[in-house]
Amino acid sequence: MDIDDKVAALRRPGTYPEPTAAIDVVETHMSWVFMTERHVYKLKKPVRYPFLDFTTLDARERDCLEEVRLNRRLAPDIYLGVVPLTRGRDREIRLEGEGEVLDWLVWMHRLPEERMLKSLIMQGDVSEEDVRRFMEVLCRFYRQAPAEPVSTAAYLARYRVDIDANEQTLTAATPPLPQERITQVIRAHRAFLADHGELLAIRAADGRVIEAHGDLRPEHICLLAEPVFIDCLEFKRDFRLLDPVEELAFLAMECEHLSADWIRPLVFDSYRQCTGDLPPKGLVTFYLSFRATLRARLAVWHARNGDEAKWLRHAGEYLAIAARHAGEP
C-alpha cells in the first residue's frame, strides 16, 4: 500500500480507535500529521534525504520509537507511544487493529494551539513570567544532561563545513538572494572562526556540548502549567549535540523572526541565573547569526521541494537577521 492510500485511510474518522467527528491534517516535508479532538498521530513519509532514510517499514518504526523516547525527556506525559496502522482479514484499515502492519505512527496527546509560544507571540500575549517559567524547565534539563565528549578540532570543523554549505546553497538559490548580504554574513562567520575560534573550542573543552532538543522553535513550546517542549530533532543524533547557548540562540533568533526580539535578553538572563554559565556576548552573537544563516539555507532547500515563493521569502528574512547580528562586534 502506498503513502497516498494510507493518508486517505487516516483522513477517515472510522479508522481511529476513538470516536472523533473530524480529522485535522497537516503535511510536512517528512510526515503527515492527523489530529482528532484529543490525540495526534504522526505518519512518517517513505523519503530519503542525505540526513535520513525512511524508505523501509523497519526504519520508520525505529524512528517513531526514537521520537517517543527522546521527546519524553521534555514532554513526559504528552508522548503516549507508537501504534500500528493495520489491515485486517476484512480488508479494513484501522489504527491499533489486528492483522498486517502497514505502518507505524507516533501517538501523542493533542496540545492546545492557543498555548503554543508561537501563537502567544503572534497574539501579543506572552509575559516575562511566561519566558522565565519555560526557561526554568529548560535549564533543569540542561543541568541534568551529561556532557558529550567532542574534540575541539571536531567541534570547529563542524562549523567550517556548515559555513561552506551555507554559502554554496544560498549562492545557488533561484531566484537569487542578495549576494552582497550572503558575502557579508559568510565572511563574518569565517572571520569569527579565525579570530575567536577559541571561544567555541573552550565550550567543547569545558564539556558544554550535550544531547539537546535540536529544534527549539516557538511552535514547539507549549505553556501549560508545566511547560512542555515537543518535536525534538530525532532522526540524526549529531544534529542534537549542541551547546545549550547555541540552542537558546536559535530559539531567540526564531522569536526575533516573529518580531519578539525582546524575549532574547530574558532567555539568556534566565539561563545565566539558573546555570551560572556566563557565555561571552561575542559567542552568543555568532550563534545567533550562524543559526539564522542555517535557517536561510534550510528555507532554500524547502523551496526546491514546494511553495517556492513562501520559502524564499523566509530565506531572505533569515538572511537579514543573520546579517544584522554578523554586523555586531
Image (cartoon, rainbow, N blue to C red):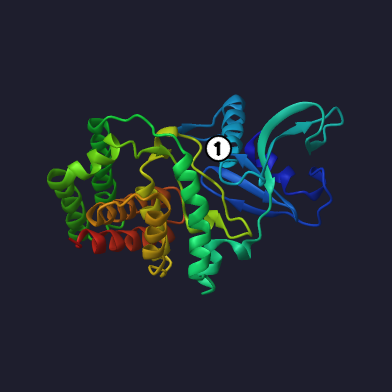
Q: Which residue corresponds to the image point at 42% horizontal and 63% vertical from the top-left?
A: 255
Q: Which residue corresponds to the image point at 40% horizontal and 56% vertical from the top-left?
A: 273
Image location of residue 225, percent across then percent down: 64, 59
At label 1, which amino acid type do we have? Leu
Furthest residue in direction right, as rendered? 90
Q: Nearer the viewer, residue 323 or 176?
A: 323
Q: Nearer the viewer, residue 70 or 187?
A: 70
Q: Which residue is mark 1?
A: 70
Q: Is residue 50 visible?
A: no
Furthest residue in direction bottom, as rendered? 124
Secondary structure category for the residue under label 1 = helix
Can you say which quadrant of the picture contains the N terminus? top right
Image location of residue 155, percent across then percent down: 27, 35
The local crowd at label 1, few if under 14, some if 14 to 19, many if 20 or more residues have their Cα within 10 Å, is many
Q: Quick check: 177 left or right of 236?
A: left
Q: Which residue corresponds to the image point at 67% horizontal and 33% vertical from the top-left?
A: 104
In the displayed structure, would residue 282 be above or below residue 130? above
In the displayed structure, would residue 140 be above or below residue 258? above
Q: Which residue corresponds to the image point at 51% horizontal and 37% vertical from the top-left?
A: 234
